[in-house]
Image (cartoon, helix red, strand yellow):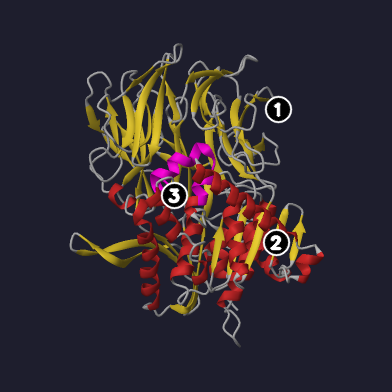
Amino acid sequence: MLASNLVYRALAALMSACVLLSAGTSAQAQQAGAPPHQEHGNLVLEGIPPLDAAMGARLERYQQSRQATFLDWQADGSMLVSTRFGDVEQVHRVAAPLAMREQLTFSRDPVSLARAPRTGSGNGFVFLKDRDGDENSQLYYYGGSGSGSVRQLTTGSFLHGNPIWANDGKRVAFHGNERDGVSYDVYVVDVTTAAAPRLVVGGQQDTWYPLDWSADDRKLLLWKYVSINESYLYIADVATGSVTPVDESGRKIGIRSAKFAPDGRGIYLISDEEGEFAQLRYLDPVSHEVRKVTPDLQWDVEDFDVSVDGRYIAYVVNEDGHSRLTVLDSQRKLELAPPGLPDGQISNVRFDHAGKRLAMSADSAQAPRDVYVYDLARGALERWTRSELGGLDPNAAAPAELVHYPTWDRVNGRQRMISAYVYRPRNPGPFPVVISIHGGPEAQYRPGWDPFVQFLVNDLGYAVIAPNVRGSSGYGKSFLKLDNGVLREDAVRDIGSLLFWIGLQPAFDRDHVSVMGGSYGGYMALASVAAYGDRLRGGIDVVGISNFASFLGGTSAYRRDLRREEYGDERDPKMRVFLNRISPLTNVASIRRPLLVVQGMNDPRVPATESQQMVWRIRLKGGEAWYLAAKDEGHGFRKKANQDVYLQTAAMFLSKLAETPGRPVQQAGK
């Protein structure tokens, strides 16, 4: 407790120092040579040169592109999608293939999750919305009467999520943490009444998610999540709240998703219990018989759905970052593969209420995300949305090239290989390079539509390389664990191996390589600049971790134990010493390259102090740190106006890093 109090006192003192540092308008700050300080609405810019209007105009063409994401089917056969017409994404209704998008929600904050009931004749739905990125999402009910009436179902500064409709079309199960601020409890609310949500299952400081209702609406399938490698399924009695484990053996396995089978007896689930990869299985909770639904695969099954009559099972396999959709027809004993989908990511697969059509979102490196429907009766793929590219030429988009590079260690007697996606300009090289590192760390870089990547490649002449270093998902559960706890620095060494590989490629300018990343990727960017500053020009850190001990002490209480599973427990003295030793803040003396640090001030995951203390320490030793903060954002920038300024700043920063004295950065096509 004493150590924890000391951490919070240190953070408070540091915050005060950072506030004084960022004030910028006081005479004392000006006399001390404080960096230029500007405020534009909710944005704070420190040490950042005046924004380049010409650069902004070039970037704007890319930022005008939009995407559409499938959310759910409605009872009348129409669908809900999320897309952006203004500053943020909102819920829209689409009645038929390529029909107009009718906007239903209107909020200054994005709405990107909505669920409609599986039965009934109305077009009501529930949706989640937070405030300024604080992730304390509240649950709302849209009445669907044509009046656009919206009723808030939950209140308070607490998070809620995973709404699941009962089959009666009246009740919704969801999780929330208002009871103690830590536990993910399970609640049920009746949207047809004004009654408050009822607590069904108390999480007891654990993380519980409702996944599905039984056919008779008497039971809920619950998921108790410990880590990506450990989770458990339970069945809860909705009336009494009693819970029963589906598997009483208590085996430690990774479960990704699950739902009741239409037969009313079994459970479909994706788990890694018998091998390296997550596979789709059918479990009989009574006989405890388990059978595989998918054939033996050397990749993860990442998503699935089952038609209402059980005839069709759709599942998506993640093959080295690319999605492959298969639909099993149990009646005709066929495997169906819808043709014509973009070669990239497929997500949110869901059958309609009749079980005859399968909707999904799909995008690729060269095509924005859109909604497609596979009509099973006709065997035809229909496109339901066609998102605008903002005036860009779709034929000019750079593809994502899958490569594999050797890293520093060996496995099974052979050099370990790391997957990466490479985007290259069309001009002859050598090109400056930016290494883009994903967050998580239990995530994976997937080739999807990214207008900023396309801008870097086609306009600034950069090659972009996005690696999946050890600890990434998608490559087996052993690979996933290779960066846990005291193995954290091994992932940073994978970036060192990538830099060596870049140096051997004639198409790349090894003297002009930079690194960027968000969240955990922000930590990786900072750690890479500290470890390989002689081979890097600089780095961009977006909402990144600068010190693991202070991060674990400052992250929201409901996330703390989940993150300790991955990074280690800072309350253990030996682990705390290790976490401090590997943290970028400790190694700030080794950072001799410019940094751009970006932060949402309402971030509940990585507190703003993580960025502020890094900027403060860099400047204290005379280093260069651009700092951009948003008062109305959280863990990343979701509002287009803020995104535009961030990406314009990042473009200016990378343009500067690509310059050689006497030679400006090469611009593609110029």
Tell me the crowding category of disc 1: few under 14, some 14 to 19, or many 20 or more residues within 10 angstroms, Cα based. Answer: few
Count the marks. 3
Residue, disc 1: 148
Residue 249: % across, % down: 24, 27
Q: Earlier in the sequence, mark 2 or mark 1?
A: 2
Q: Classify the position of the C terminus by image quarter.
A: bottom right
Q: Earlier in the sequence, mark 3 or mark 1?
A: 1
Tell me the crowding category of disc 3: few under 14, some 14 to 19, or many 20 or more residues within 10 angstroms, Cα based. Answer: many
- For the stretch drawn in magenta, the main secondary structure is helix
The amino acid sitting under disc 2 is: Leu
Q: Is residue 280 above or below residue 442?
A: above
Q: Is residue 551 above or below residue 495?
A: above
411 or 149, which is in the foreground?
A: 411
Q: Residue furthest left?
A: 413
Q: Earlier in the sequence, mark 2 or mark 3?
A: 2
Instruction: Please give the name of the residue rendered at 57% of the width and 61% of the height, measured from the top-left corner.
Output: 614
Q: Is residue 518 magenta?
A: no
Q: CA distance from mark 2 to mark 1?
A: 47 Å
* Residue 192, numbered circle: none
Instruction: Please give the name of the residue rendered at 70% of the width and 38% of the height, measured from the top-left corner.
Output: 107
Q: Residue furthest front?
A: 2
The amino acid sitting under disc 1 is: Gly
Residue 506: % across, % down: 40, 80
20 or 359, which is in the foreground?
A: 20
The amino acid sitting under disc 3 is: Gln
User: Which stretch is magenta?
Assistant: 550-570
Residue 502: % across, % down: 40, 74
Q: Quadrant of residue 621?
A: bottom right
* Residue 21, numbered circle: 2
Mark 2: secondary structure: helix
Residue, disc 3: 345
Q: Are marks 2 and 3 in contact (CB under 8 Å)?
A: no
